[in-house]
């Protein structure tokens, strides 16, 4: 019986793109919800003030850094999407494939925001609506990006990648 860890890399490509498409769809649906339900409203507590729903439009990167250079983030994100696709179609393990698919989905949905949202093409603002105790406000794509990065780091930090490669050989 063939396990998911022993499947050939080509068999994982549809999974990578399916997860990425799921992330894009979930992120865009939740942003639609946020815009339709939170526009003009005070923050809505989910877990008191620790977790709230608050609609913001972010022209910059994380923490609104570089708000005046939105077009630069558009270019960087487009390059990141191409690089992620290149790596995602040839992952070395199932963990890496999953991590790359989460990163790809998060990057694509941020690119879509930059390209097609107000104030205009390649200058669009990212819709953020999950407020984490006032520390930062993010969205589903940010959660996917964070989880993907953690999944890439865990094997590197704890030697799991080498074990995964040995299992697949």
Image (cartoon, rainbow, N blue to C red):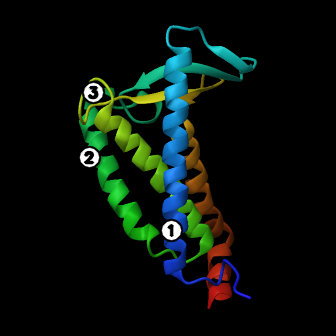
Rounded to the nearest angstrom, the CA distance separating label 2 from label 3 is: 14 Å
Residue 72, compared with residue 21, is above or below; it is above
Observer able to see residue 167: yes
The residue to which callout 1 is attached is: 14
- Helix, strand or loop at label 3? It is helix
Indicate which disc, 2 or 1, sits on the residue closer to the N terminus: 1
Residue 79 in the image: state x and y as whole percent.
Answer: 30, 55
Q: Residue furthest bottom?
A: 169
Q: Is residue 115 left or right of residue 131?
A: left
Residue for point 48% across, 51% down: 105
Q: Is residue 20 left or right of residue 155?
A: left
Q: Nearer the viewer, mark 3 or mark 1?
A: 1
Q: Which corner quadrant of the image does residue 143 belong to? A: top right
The residue to which callout 2 is attached is: 75
The residue to which callout 3 is attached is: 68
Residue 27 in the image: state x and y as whole percent.
Answer: 52, 39
Please tell me the numbered disc located at residue 99.
Answer: none
- Helix, strand or loop at label 2? It is helix
Residue for point 56% across, 48% down: 144
Residue 128 in the image: state x and y as whole percent.
Answer: 50, 28
Are the residues flagged by discs 2 and 1 in contact, CB closer than 8 Å? no
- Helix, strand or loop at label 1? It is helix
Residue for point 40% across, 48% down: 108
In the picture, the quarter occupied by the N terminus is bottom right
Rounded to the nearest angstrom, the CA distance separating label 3 from label 1 is: 37 Å
Rounded to the nearest angstrom, the CA distance separating label 2 from label 1 is: 26 Å
Indicate which disc, 3 or 1, sits on the residue closer to the N terminus: 1
Q: How many marks?
A: 3
Residue 59 in the image: state x and y as whole percent.
Answer: 35, 28
Mark 2: few/some/many CA within 10 Å (<14, 14-19, 20+): some
Q: Is residue 142 left or right of residue 66?
A: right
């Amino acid at each position: 019986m063939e396990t998911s860890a022993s499947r050939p890399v080509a068999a994982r490509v549809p999974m990578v793109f399916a997860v990425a498409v799921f992330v894009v769809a979930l992120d865009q649906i939740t942003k639609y919800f946020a815009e339709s339900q939170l526009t003009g409203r005070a923050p809505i507590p989910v877990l008191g003030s620790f977790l709230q729903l608050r609609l913001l439009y972010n022209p910059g990167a994380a923490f609104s850094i570089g708000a005046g250079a939105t077009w630069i983030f558009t270019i960087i994100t487009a390059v990141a999407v191409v690089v992620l696709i290149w790596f995602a179609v040839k992952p070395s393990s199932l963990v890496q494939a999953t991590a790359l698919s989460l990163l790809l989905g998060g990057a694509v949905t941020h690119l879509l925001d930059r390209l097609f949202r107000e104030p205009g093409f390649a200058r669009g603002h990212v819709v953020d609506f999950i407020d984490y105790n006032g520390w930062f406000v993010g969205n589903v794509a940010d959660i996917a990006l964070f989880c993907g990065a953690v999944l890439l780091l865990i094997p590197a930090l704890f030697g799991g990648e080498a074990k995964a490669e040995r299992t697949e050989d």
